[in-house]
Image (tube, rainbow, N blue to C red):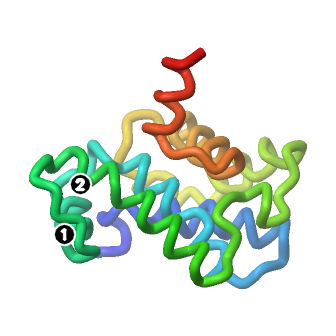
Amino acid sequence: MSYGSAGLNAVHGIAYGVAALTHQSHGATNAVVLPYVIDALRESRHAELLEVARMFGIQTADEVQAVRALPHQLRELVGKLGIPTDLNAFGVTRTSLQELLTDSLGVTRLAKAFPVGNIEDSYADIINNAWHNRLQDETTARLAAD
């Protein structure tokens, strides 16, 4: 029950597709995707992610900023573990991103339980951001600068 309602099912669903492309371990494929899925859940799972942020020692009084800091800290941790922090460095080619999206959405038991409005768009954003090594606030900052 908790697996289907936590929202992290997208980590596993996308990780299966990454493993099919790269033949890397499920643990490593989950790790490379995790920060980007957490980033996508910032609004729909704010309270839960705030709790996790506090467990990670993120103590800023601004709760929104604390939740925004969590994916950054997770991505940094993944890198410290010696796992690439983006799909490009992990061996996923740009030309395979659509295939990855299709395969990930094909794990329907996980995709259907992802707590966002438009699952396909959200998965596409997660995969794109994970390939470019961008979290949402970095994407917003780049767009504002352009």
At label 1, the amino acid type is Arg
Looking at the image, which is closer to me, 48 or 7?
48
The dot on residue 54 is 1
Circle 2/circle 1 CB separation < 8 Å: yes
Q: Is residue 116 left or right of residue 107?
A: left
Q: Residue at x 23, y 65 (%)?
A: 58
Q: Quadrant of residue 25?
A: bottom right
Considering the image in quadrants, where does the C terminus appear?
Answer: top right
Q: Which residue in the protein does label 2 denote?
A: 66
Could you tell whether 97 is left or right of 39 in the image? right
Give the left or right position of residue 54, taking residue 22 as reference.
left
Residue in the image at 66% along x and 42% along y = 128
Residue at point 44% right, 58% down?
Answer: 72
Q: Of 141 and 37, which appears nearest the observer?
A: 141
Question: Looking at the picture, how far across and down is residue 138, in whole percent?
Answer: 50, 38
Residue 52, given in percent of the width and then of the height, sits at 25, 70
Is residue 28 placed above or below 52 in the rendered structure?
Answer: below
